[in-house]
Image (cartoon, coloured by chain):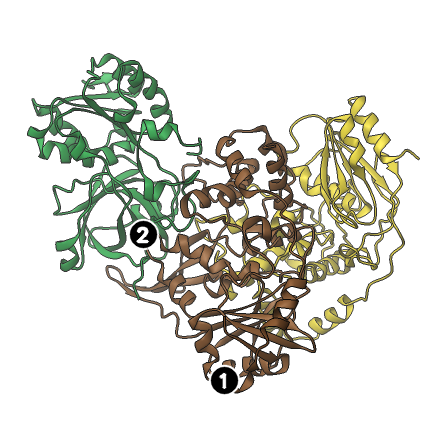
Chain colours: A brown, B green, C yellow
């Protein structure tokens, strides 16, 4: 694998150059993937928790028009939105975030292809970074990711001494991104990077995902669900901060009597109205059923359908849950039930 | 860029009021080119939209053997159906589809077919009835059992008359006890009871059943008792949908997307699903 | 004074309550909501300076409150919400049993050495409605910086256009998850105005317009009702300082009508009461 080396200062300068080239550059500043505009951002995140929100918005915005319309008494004209044309760069993506686009890509591309997602995914370049953070909510290794995995990254940063980074070139997209700016880089030292990578402790798996799945295969009806997330407030923050939750709503919004737009908006299965029919019937009428859906979708249904777990083990949903519900802990309990 | 969310535009060519809250629209594609290539199979559904109100999901009620119009029937229940009900002939709606799987009409050829439906549930069944009747020679005995709460709630009255007049179809129309009018000539009784008394042959017979969940719940055991094969009892599921093509994550029942793997399911398949419909 | 665990245990043993909503430890320096149903469950109950949640939100959840008397562990500030719910006829006092303590304040977040903002100038550290008293554990915390007063002065000095922009910007980060609403003890409506579609009062998209209308309408719906528990802000994944506008409205209710929600169960609610001495003559 080709490796280069860059100083943090140069990396940030490079970011500014990409901004000047008209790209959206997001930098992990340790708390947030902030959009780098005119001011420079500090790059952190090697030792910090994953930012509160993932950057899934770059491929799957919280709200976006899927069409505009003009209408008169009898006629309707549809105007297509223009999307894409702007590259999105993420600098310092956590390995648990870097995997998200390829996981979501499965659902947005089976049979019908969602261009809104695809155009943006094609135009996104993910610069991942090794991760030294690990808390009680992290469990990336349990779902096949690791703090040093380059899966989903186009370039991969390895923090070295004195604010230097080893830069591994993972994909052609990554190579192309930096091709114009070779002068910012020096030759990389693979051995130094390797030493850093091997010094990062790889957390032990908290659960065996296959066991969890096999329990879920058989326990749709189980007393377990009634008591597992009984304190859940149905607040949906878990789904909104999740790097791979992808459910959405479609709504129309008029801005005048003659014009409006149709929007695709984030939605979440923990919301009671999510499955409610206009007739009033609701297949998931209680919170335990909705919580079961959340766990099952992540650890069984998506795996059945797309051969991926719909979870990267980032732990955001648990860190942010106002009721202290920890999906990792719950899944760990399921794993123990199988022993 | 191909926009899978972009609907075709359709003109409302005719509105047929069915009951006080149910209507049928006959729709024509605005673009003749689309009209000439558009195709679907009986049982598939579409997303119909009123611009400014949103989209809603229902089956294509007309038969693919009759492509002059696309027809849909709907009951006013929410925001979009209420808006549809306010529309007039000549106005434009959006149409995305066809989506989902379909009734196994090919596989049904050479067999008897029993159609059982209740209320607005006749809409998804009607497309297959028309389809089968247009290929009448390729099927054996055909029975249609349709029930509604009252005489006022019967939909497709003209079609019911037409079917009742045909000698090659046995048509039984029933209303719930108390829902009859003084001059009602049909049956009085709930659909499951009527099915039980209809002296149906289960052998080499497909049963297609659509209607309110409560009707399906009580009719299924009757069909099984009569000896129908689980793989030949076919119904549709109506989970809430938004996108219609397996993206938005709303209609899932377990790992099944009703919009993609359904809406048509055999009883055998349905039994294997978690009870989330 | 009885020890919490023993108290909860005996309440459950004696059948005085069918369940107790309380806290249990959740890692170090953190707790989470918990329901004790059997006397053994009482073992896990704690009350300390890491008990940030306002548990009164569960009192209007039908799936949790389903018959029998419910015990609830509540700090003074949480009691204000219980009183507000009694004032608004959502719950009956006889259906609940409040277990409280002289409050030491709670930490701003996990492991924090300073109080949560809601503890600043708290007037109900001594509980004002309770049935059982226990001791609150935990170490002394220090005062956080007062960011509110300065921000309030800044906003009050703005003209209406500037304020509009200020709040539009603040709410533009909203992602419309409605976690604020779900975590709020006073957001108990069976059908929230945000979920009504005929007509659609509030655009459901997380656009600037939809965000402003949702957050402003919520602030108005909480005016004279919000007790300042800040659960909305704690739940917000977009880190919007939601308590700011709520506090502005709270201060207005206090200054204009000398009203503070959840202080006295006998007081009629601000919005639900009528006063001929009102400052505005349109209502006289």
The tag earlier along the polypeptide, 1 or 2, is: 2
* Residue A213 image point, x, y percent: 51, 39
Left or right: A209 in relation to A68: right
Residue at (93% x, 35% y) in the render: C1
Marker count (numbered): 2
Q: Which residue is mark 2?
A: A111
Instruction: Say if residue C218 shows up in the picture.
Output: yes
Query: For residue A236, which numbered disc appears in the image?
Result: none
Q: Residue lying furthest front in this view? A: A191
Left or right: B210 in relation to B128: right
Q: Chain of mark 1?
A: A
Q: Chain of mark 2?
A: A
Left or right: B40 in relation to C108: left
* Residue B137 image point, x, y percent: 6, 29
Q: Nearer the viewer, residue B151 or C46?
A: C46
Q: Nearer the viewer, residue C56 or B254?
A: B254
Residue at (59% x, 52% y) in the render: A141
Q: Residue lying furthest bottom in this view? A: A183
Q: Relative to A293, does residue A151 appear above or below in the rendering? A: below
Within 10 Å of disc 2 (Cα), the crowding (few <14, some 14-19, many 20+) is: few
Q: Are marks 1 and 2 in contact (CB under 8 Å)?
A: no
Which image quadrant is residue A279 in? top left
Instruction: Say if residue C222 shows up in the picture.
Output: no
Query: For residue A181, which numbered disc appears in the image?
Result: 1
Where disc 1 sits, the SS reads loop
* Residue C232 image point, x, y percent: 66, 53
Q: Relative to C250, does residue A339 appear above or below in the rendering? A: above
Where disc 2 sits, the SS reads loop
Q: Residue lying furthest right in this view? A: C1
The answer for how far apart the CA atoms under marks 1 and 2 are is 39 Å
* Residue B50 image point, x, y percent: 32, 53
């Amino acid at each position: 694998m080709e490796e280069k080396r860059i100083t943090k200062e140069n990396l940030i300068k490079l970011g500014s150059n990409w901004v000047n080239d008209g790209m959206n550059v997001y930098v992990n500043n340790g708390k947030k993937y902030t959009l780098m505009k005119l001011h420079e951002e500090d790059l952190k995140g090697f030792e910090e928790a994953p930012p509160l929100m993932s950057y899934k918005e770059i491929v799957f915005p919280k709200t976006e028009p899927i069409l505009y319309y003009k209408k008169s008494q009898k006629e309707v004209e549809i105007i297509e939105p223009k999307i894409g044309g702007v590259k999105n760069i993420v600098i310092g993506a956590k390995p648990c975030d870097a995997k998200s686009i390829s996981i979501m890509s499965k659902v947005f591309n089976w049979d019908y292809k969602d261009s809104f997602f695809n155009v943006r995914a094609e135009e996104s370049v993910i610069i991942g970074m090794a991760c030294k953070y690990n808390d009680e909510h992290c469990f990336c290794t349990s779902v096949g990711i690791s703090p040093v995995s380059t899966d989903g990254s186009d370039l991969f940063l390895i923090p070295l001494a004195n604010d230097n980074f080893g830069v591994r070139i993972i994909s052609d997209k990554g190579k192309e991104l930096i091709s114009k700016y070779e002068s910012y880089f020096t030759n990389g030292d693979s051995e130094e990077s390797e030493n850093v990578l091997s010094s990062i402790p790889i957390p032990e798996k908290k659960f065996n995902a296959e066991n969890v799945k096999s329990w879920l295969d058989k326990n749709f009806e189980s007393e377990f669900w009634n008591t597992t997330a009984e304190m859940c407030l149905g607040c949906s923050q878990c789904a909104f901060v999740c790097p791979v939750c992808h459910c959405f709503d479609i709504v129309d919004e008029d801005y005048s009597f003659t014009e409006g737009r149709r929007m695709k908006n984030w939605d979440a299965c923990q919301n009671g109205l999510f499955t409610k029919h206009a007739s009033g019937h609701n297949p998931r009428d209680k919170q335990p059923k909705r919580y079961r859906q959340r766990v099952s979708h992540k650890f069984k249904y998506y795996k059945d359908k797309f051969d991926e777990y719909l979870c990267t083990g980032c732990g955001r949903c648990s860190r942010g849950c106002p009721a202290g519900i920890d999906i990792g802990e719950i899944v760990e309990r399921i794993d123990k039930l199988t022993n | 860029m191909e926009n899978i969310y972009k609907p075709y535009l359709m003109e409302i060519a005719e509105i047929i009021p069915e009951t006080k809250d149910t209507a049928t629209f006959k729709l024509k594609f605005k673009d003749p080119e689309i009209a000439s290539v558009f195709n679907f199979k009986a049982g598939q559904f579409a997303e119909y939209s009123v611009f400014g109100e949103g989209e809603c999901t229902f089956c294509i009620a007309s038969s693919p053997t009759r492509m002059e119009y696309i027809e849909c029937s709907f009951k006013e229940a929410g925001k979009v159906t209420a808006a549809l009900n306010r529309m007039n002939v000549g106005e434009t709606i959006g149409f995305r589809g066809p989506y989902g799987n379909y009734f196994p009409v090919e596989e049904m050829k050479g067999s008897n077919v029993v159609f059982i439906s209740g209320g607005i549930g006749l809409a998804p069944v009607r497309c297959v009835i028309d389809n089968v009747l247009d290929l009448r020679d390729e099927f054996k005995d055909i029975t249609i059992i349709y029930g509604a709460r009252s005489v006022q709630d019967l939909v497709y009255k003209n079609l019911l008359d037409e079917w009742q007049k045909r000698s090659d179809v046995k048509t039984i129309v029933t209303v719930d006890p108390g829902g009859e009018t003084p001059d009602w000539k049909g049956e009085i009784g709930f659909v499951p009871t009527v099915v039980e008394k209809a002296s149906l042959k289960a052998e080499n017979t497909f049963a297609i059943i659509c209607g309110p969940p409560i009707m399906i719940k009580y009719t299924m055991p009757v069909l099984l008792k009569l000896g129908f094969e689980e793989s030949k009892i076919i119904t549709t599921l109506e989970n809430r949908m938004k996108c219609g093509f397996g993206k938005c994550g709303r209609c899932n029942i377990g790992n099944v997307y009703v919009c993609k793997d359904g809406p048509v399911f055999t009883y055998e398949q349905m039994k294997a699903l978690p009870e989330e419909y | 004074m009885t020890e919490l665990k023993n108290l909860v245990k005996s309440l459950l043993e004696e059948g005085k309550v069918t369940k107790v909503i309380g806290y249990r430890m959740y890692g170090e320096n953190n707790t989470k909501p918990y329901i004790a149903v059997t006397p053994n469950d009482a073992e896990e109950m704690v009350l300390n300076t890491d008990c940030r949640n306002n548990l009164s939100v569960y009192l209007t959840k039908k799936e949790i409150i389903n018959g029998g008397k419910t015990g609830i562990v509540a700090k003074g500030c949480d009691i204000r919400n219980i009183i507000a719910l009694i004032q608004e006829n959502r719950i009956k006092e006889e259906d609940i049993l409040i277990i409280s303590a002289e409050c030491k304040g709670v930490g701003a977040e996990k492991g924090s050495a300073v109080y949560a903002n809601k503890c600043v100038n708290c007037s109900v550290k001594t509980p004002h409605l309770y049935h059982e008293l226990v001791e609150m554990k935990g170490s002394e915390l220090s005062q956080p910086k007062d960011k509110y007063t300065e921000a309030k002065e800044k906003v009050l000095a703005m003209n209406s256009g500037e304020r509009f922009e200020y709040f539009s910007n603040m709410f533009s980060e909203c992602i419309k998850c409605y976690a604020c609403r779900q975590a709020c003890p006073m957001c108990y409506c069976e059908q929230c105005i945000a979920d009504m579609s005929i007509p659609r009062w509030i655009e459901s998209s997380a656009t600037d317009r939809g965000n402003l209308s949702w957050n402003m309408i919520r602030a108005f719906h909480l005016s004279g009702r919000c007790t300042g528990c800040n659960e909305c802000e704690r739940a917000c994944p977009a880190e919007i300082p939601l308590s700011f506008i709520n506090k502005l409205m709270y201060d207005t209710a206090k200054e204009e009508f000398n009203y503070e929600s959840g202080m006295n169960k006998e007081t009629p609610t601000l919005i639900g009461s009528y006063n001929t001495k009102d400052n505005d003559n349109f209502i006289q």
